[in-house]
Image (cartoon, rainbow, N blue to C red):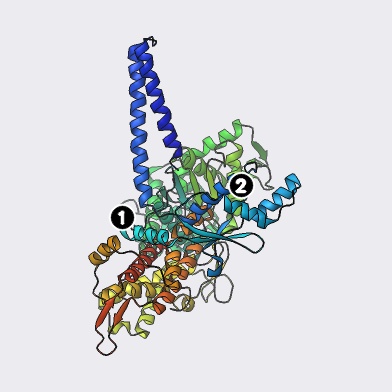
């Protein structure tokens, strides 16, 4: 990864020498110019050397992605064995069973197919595997390789390599894998509508979006978290008209709108039944869009009531987000329409201005027949702003699957007009399924209404406390510890139940399942984590002693369960790398569950602290095993942090 910089340093050094020679020979027409050039090159050389040192020091702290290392090694081996083969398949995966080693390279079968198709050479995969194995370059991680079956290459890792990586993790903490150039990521998530309460449908976007932001931030990206609020549009006409009637002194006395949902329903009913009110509502929209100060104040009052309600939910779920509603893009929309017109993409259909995008049957409507704008216009304006003003390298829209065709059309329109090249800029719709009730139908209240998110969170708190009291935790925890455990379990379980399902699928919301402390649930993982953290504490080993041991002790991995746990801990960077690519967070949940169950196997088989059976006195502390406990807890804590779950020390 440093080859490019090292090569540039060599070239710059040679160029400085060449300029020196020119100066000696008196060839340069301008000695001053030569000195300037020389100074620039020396500055660049020093800068590169410094940045190379910084990158190296960063990379020594970064957790090594073992899968990526093995891919580099096997990539070089395949290149050496088959130098004429273009883009050969490179398949390296963790082995499913210990008898097949620690990792497997399964490229031989694919190469065999390519040789048969492109060169009509029939070579059995086993021969190819043997040729690859012979060309494996010298490296620090592979102990040995074996050819198995039709041509699988089983890889056995070196124990000292794994031990060294675990020590590095304990000394440096969980560091992100090296990512190269720092890119800017813009994540659009949550996005409720003003004057409507957040409901269970907003839960998934909010939780998934927050977790994605945390992952990209941990990996070292510059992340902008945007809340694309529905804060503009015709519905504000009826809301402002109703506000004027119900609270005529709203300009001087702040209106006591307690229940905005009821206020919205009242105004909607009047809009649907009173013709005079409807006309006035349309006039209010025109005055609002022309920025009349009284109407802007009314609009702000309504928005503020909603913001306060949204913030209660964001506080509960520990969500950080910047408001950037549709109103923010309103002034940009006329320029968007003009740009599409100037480039000849606009057609007029029954008074509407529409844009047909190749490959999509339904056009985008960028201006209605009455001259108003649409969601299509605001989403195009937002896309351009995020690309040109925010300079986003990666744009992610965390919005439900029902919007898939809409976003694909908007993104394709952005490419068509030349705003971005998908090979350079990644623009992705991270779609998700709906939340279902236990009857497998859309999650509703008994009366058939949409479930309010605030009610759901309060129910979660109540059930978490009931669960803790069933386990008699209220008898052993202080009131403060009990409260901390309640919020940790309630909100942790709601988040984990969502994130542990593949976001592309619908999922069934069940408090009973998510609060179960058996199986792949937050309740089980939080309990496992507090247990692991307690092991060293009960052995009277404090943090300082663990830090000292991490620098001095060699992590012995002789027992098969120690070896299994050590390798599992070190898979963390490759799990994160996969999620950065496919944005599927359930992979992290599956990994944390696997780590917790692998730890249980280790703990049941390997004594960390040995006690006298009669007296219960500690007779021996196996420090290297306590360090494995610490490494497990450290990785779990970082996993929880990415998922937005707050563990507690006592539970």
Residue in the picture at 30% in, 62% down:
550
Question: Looking at the picture, how far across and down is residue 49, in whole percent?
Answer: 35, 35
Question: Looking at the picture, how far across and down is residue 446, in whole percent?
Answer: 52, 77
Which residue corresponds to mark 1?
A: 253
Asked whether the viewer can see residue 406, the reply is: yes
Question: Looking at the picture, how far across and down is residue 242, in whole percent?
Answer: 44, 57
Residue found at the very far right of the displayed protein:
120
The earlier-in-sequence mark between 1 and 2 is: 2
Front residue of 203/264: it is: 203
Asked whether the viewer can see residue 287, the reply is: no
Look at the numbered disc 2 and give the secondary structure of its residue. Answer: helix
Is 17 displayed left or right of 130 in the figure? left
Front residue of 224/585: it is: 585
Quadrant holding the N terminus: top left
Residue in the picture at 30% in, 64% down:
553
Which residue corresponds to mark 2?
A: 81
Q: What is the count of numbered marks?
A: 2
């Amino acid at each position: 990864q440093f080859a490019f910089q090292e090569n540039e340093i060599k070239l710059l050094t040679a160029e400085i020498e060449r300029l020196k020679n020119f100066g000696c020979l008196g060839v340069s027409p301008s000695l001053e110019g030569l000195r300037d050039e020389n100074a620039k090159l020396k500055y660049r050389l020093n800068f590169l050397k410094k940045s190379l040192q910084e990158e190296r020091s960063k990379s020594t702290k970064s957790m090594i992605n073992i899968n990526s290392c093995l891919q580099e090694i096997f990539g070089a081996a395949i290149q050496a064995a088959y130098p004429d083969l273009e883009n050969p398949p490179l398949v390296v995966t963790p082995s499913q069973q210990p008898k097949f080693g620690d990792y497997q390279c399964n490229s031989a079968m694919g190469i065999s197919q390519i040789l048969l198709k492109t060169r009509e050479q029939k070579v059995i995969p086993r021969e190819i595997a043997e040729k690859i194995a012979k060309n494996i370059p010298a490296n620090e991680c592979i102990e040995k390789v074996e050819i198995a079956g039709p041509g699988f290459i089983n890889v056995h890792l070196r124990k000292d390599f794994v031990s060294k990586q675990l020590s590095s993790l304990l000394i440096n903490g969980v560091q992100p894998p090296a990512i190269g150039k720092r890119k800017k990521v813009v994540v659009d998530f949550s996005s409720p509508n003003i004057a409507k309460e957040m409901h269970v449908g907003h839960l998934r976007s909010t939780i998934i979006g927050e977790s994605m932001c945390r992952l990209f931030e941990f990996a070292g990206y510059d992340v902008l978290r945007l809340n694309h609020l529905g804060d503009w549009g015709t519905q504000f006409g009826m809301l402002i008209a109703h506000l004027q009637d119900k609270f005529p002194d709203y300009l001087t006395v702040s209106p006591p709108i307690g229940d905005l949902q009821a206020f919205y329903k009242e105004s909607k009913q009047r809009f649907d039944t009173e013709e005079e009110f409807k006309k006035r509502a349309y006039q209010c929209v025109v005055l609002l869009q022309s920025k009349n100060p009284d109407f802007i104040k009314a609009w702000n009052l309504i928005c503020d009531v909603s913001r306060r309600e949204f913030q209660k939910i964001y506080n509960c779920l520990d969500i950080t987000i910047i408001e950037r509603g549709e109103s923010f893009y309103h002034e940009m929309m006329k320029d968007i329409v003009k740009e599409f017109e100037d480039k000849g993409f606009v057609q007029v259909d029954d008074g509407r201005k529409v844009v047909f995008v190749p490959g999509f049957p339904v056009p985008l409507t960028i201006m209605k027949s009455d001259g108003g704008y649409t969601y299509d216009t605001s989403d195009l304006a937002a896309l351009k702003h995020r690309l040109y003003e925010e300079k986003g390298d990666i744009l992610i829209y965390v919005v439900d699957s029902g919007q898939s065709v809409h976003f694909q059309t908007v993104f394709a329109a952005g490419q068509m007009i030349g705003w971005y090249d998908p090979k350079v800029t990644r623009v992705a719709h991270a779609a998700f399924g709906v939340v279902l009730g236990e009857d497998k139908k859309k999650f509703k209240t008994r009366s058939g209404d949409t479930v309010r998110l605030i009610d759901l969170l309060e129910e979660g708190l109540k059930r978490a406390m009931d669960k803790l009291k069933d386990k008699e935790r209220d008898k052993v925890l202080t009131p403060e510890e009990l409260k901390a455990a309640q919020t940790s379990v309630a909100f942790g379980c709601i988040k984990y139940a969502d994130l542990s399902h593949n976001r592309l699928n619908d999922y069934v919301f069940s408090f009973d399942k998510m609060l179960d402390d058996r199986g792949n649930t937050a309740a089980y993982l939080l309990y496992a984590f507090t247990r692991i953290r307690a092991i060293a504490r009960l052995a009277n080993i404090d943090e300082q002693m663990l830090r000292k041991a991490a620098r001095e002790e060699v992590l012995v991995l002789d027992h098969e369960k120690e070896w299994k746990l050590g390798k599992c801990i070190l898979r963390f960077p490759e799990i994160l790398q996969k999620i950065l690519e496919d944005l599927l967070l359930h992979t992290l949940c599956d990994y944390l569950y696997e780590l917790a169950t692998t730890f249980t196997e280790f703990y049941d088989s390997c004594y960390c602290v040995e006690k006298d059976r009669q007296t219960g006195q500690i007779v021996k502390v196996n420090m290297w095993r306590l360090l494995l406990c610490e490494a497990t807890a450290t990785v779990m804590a970082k996993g929880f942090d990415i998922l937005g779950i707050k563990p507690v020390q006592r539970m």
